[in-house]
Image (cartoon, coloured by chain):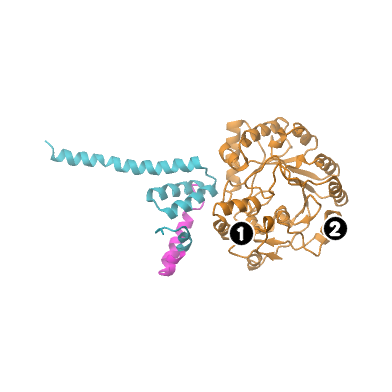
Chain colours: A orange, B cyan
């Protein structure tokens, strides 16, 4: 299924792209078909202590959409029955969900690897000060956004003062044993501060490692580069700044068929705060659910029916196939 | 209306309508120059940005600003490259003061 024009926020103008994603795949003999479900990505809601300019979730402190306990239990029941190798918890700031710690604890007990998309600054919110110890206690893999190793660029995207707090949080995670090469994983996520593609992952990772160590004594494991997706808040920015057409042309021109094989939608299933299922977190934010012939909620999930499913695609998918490709695990095509 | 329009950069290929063989040779050379080699793509993009400023070519400045960002350079590094180009342009003018001195000396008592 290919939908070239998708509605965004409240029926705003559809995203315009100079090519059709489905046709582009077909021209290369590719189809948007998933391999299976190895990662259950659970978006526990849009509540966040930050309001980043590029956020595809439109998350902020004012959002009220939060996964309730009964849906969290449905998620855990699916983990219990199907033993997903990885449970990837995201938001918003997922730690602000009252069911967050139960999701982590129970998923770990059931044997899944647990990754948490941790924004670093939430550690300074009331009741969250013990997060490094909680993460360590459950061997959580921490994945944290830090768009740049300098304050000006980071604060421009994530808000004034975020960089300094993020560095302090990274120091606390290091002190708890994270990012030291001792088995407690601390990965960082770079995304461009503007309307351009990310640099090669390896080269910018080396910059981050060198500069964060020299300037702040901070260490981490891997850096993931992620392309800004032309949806929600970032699309609004593209339109405000007159960059929509140019950015979409850049994404389409940089289409890389070699990136398709490793796209996260091939192995990931995304759950929203109400329990509905999507092929990825971006489709979730666009309200583009899994194929209509499949069960639509996590309570009805059946792994056999999702194997080889057709992934719902649209013009925004050019964001994941540009250049070295982009996924929640960073670049898809390793340089 | 300006002689330089942003969208014209995307029409560069039209130059290849006449003598496409020459244009193709140029493009192959141009692209090969920018690949990783003894210098990295990032270093080459910074050189491109500096030269673009020395030539004061708006198309090149636009293209290489984007290339620098996508190669991982930041504004501090890009600004240093621009200063290098500008300093060299200034220095190249200033060093011709020696020529002026020579000329003046030749006709002076």
The reply to whether the magenta stretch includes residue B40 is: no
Q: Position of residue A260 (x, y in %)?
A: 67, 59
Q: Which mark is residue B7?
A: none
Report the Cα–Cα distance between label 2 and label 1. 32 Å
Q: Which residues are magenta?
A: B13-39
Q: Quadrant of residue A302?
A: bottom right
Residue A36 x/y as whole percent: 78, 57
Element type where label 2 sits in the image: loop
Does A41 sit above or below residue A123? below
Q: Name the quadrant of the C terminus of chain B.
A: top left
Q: Which residue is mark 1?
A: A256
- Looking at the image, residue A52 lies above or below residue B26: above
Neighbor class of circle 1 (other Cα within 10 Å; few <14, some 14-19, many 20+) is some
- Chain ID, mark 1: A
Label 2 marks which chain's residue?
Answer: A
Q: Which residue is nearer to you in this view: A153 or A325? A: A153
Asked whether A119 or A263 is in front, the reply is A119
Residue drawn at point x = 59 percent, y = 55 percent? A323
Residue at 80 percent of width and 51 percent of height: A274
What's the residue at 74%, 41% (across, down)?
A141
Quarter in which the N terminus of chain B is drawn: bottom left
* Pointer 2 residue: A302
Residue B91, picture quadrant: top left
Q: Relative to A35, is B81 on the left or the right? A: left
Q: Does the rendering let one see residue A330?
A: yes
Q: Within 10 Å of the Cα at label 2, are there few (<14), some (14-19), or many (20+) other Cα atoms? A: some
Q: Main secondary structure of the magenta part?
A: helix
> As rendered, which of B77 and A261 lies closer to the eye?
B77
Residue A331 showing in the rendered view: no
Residue occupying the point 22% across, 41% down: B100
């Amino acid at each position: 299924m290919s939908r070239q024009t998708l509605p965004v926020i409240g029926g705003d103008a559809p995203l315009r792209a100079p090519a059709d994603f489905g046709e582009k795949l077909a021209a290369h003999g590719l189809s948007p078909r998933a391999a299976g479900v190895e990662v259950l990505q659970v978006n526990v809601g849009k509540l966040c202590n930050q309001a980043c300019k590029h956020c595809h979730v439109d998350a902020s402190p004012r959002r009220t959409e939060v996964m309730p306990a009964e849906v969290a239990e449905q998620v855990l029941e699916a983990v219990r029955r199907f033993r997903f190798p990885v449970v990837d918890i995201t938001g918003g700031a997922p730690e602000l969900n009252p069911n967050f710690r139960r999701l982590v604890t129970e998923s770990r007990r059931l044997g899944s690897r647990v990754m948490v998309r941790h924004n670093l600054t939430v550690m300074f919110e009331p009741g969250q000060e013990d997060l490094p110890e909680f993460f360590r206690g459950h061997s959580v893999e921490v994945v944290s956004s830090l768009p740049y190793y300098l304050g000006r660029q980071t604060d421009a995207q994530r808000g004034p003062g975020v960089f300094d707090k993020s560095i302090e949080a990274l120091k606390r995670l290091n002190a708890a044993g994270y990012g030291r090469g001792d088995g407690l994983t601390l990965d960082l996520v770079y995304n461009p501060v503007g309307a351009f593609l990310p640099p090669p992952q390896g080269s910018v990772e080396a910059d981050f490692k060198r500069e964060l160590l020299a300037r702040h004594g901070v260490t981490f494991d891997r850096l993931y580069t992620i392309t800004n997706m032309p949806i929600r808040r970032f699309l609004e920015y593209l339109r405000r700044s007159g960059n929509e057409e140019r950015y979409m042309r850049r994404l389409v021109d940089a289409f890389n068929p070699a990136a398709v094989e490793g796209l996260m939608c091939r192995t990931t299933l995304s759950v929203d705060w109400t329990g509905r299922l999507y092929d990825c977190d971006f489709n979730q934010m666009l309200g583009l659910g899994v194929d209509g012939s499949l069960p639509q909620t996590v309570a009805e999930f059946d792994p056999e029916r999702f194997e080889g499913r057709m992934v719902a695609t649209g013009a925004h998918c050019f964001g994941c196939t540009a250049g070295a490709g982009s996924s929640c695990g960073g670049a898809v095509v390793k340089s | 209306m300006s002689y330089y329009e942003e969208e014209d950069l995307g029409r560069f290929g039209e130059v290849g309508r006449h003598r496409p063989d020459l244009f193709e040779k140029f493009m192959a050379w141009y692209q090969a120059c920018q690949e990783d080699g003894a210098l990295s793509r990032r270093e080459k993009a910074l050189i491109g940005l500096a030269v673009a400023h020395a030539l004061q070519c708006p198309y090149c400045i636009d293209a290489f600003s984007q290339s620098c960002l996508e190669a991982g350079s930041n504004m501090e590094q890009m600004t240093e490259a621009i200063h290098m180009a500008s300093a060299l342009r200034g220095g190249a003018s200033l060093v011709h003061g020696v020529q002026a001195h020579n000329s003046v000396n030749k006709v002076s008592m």
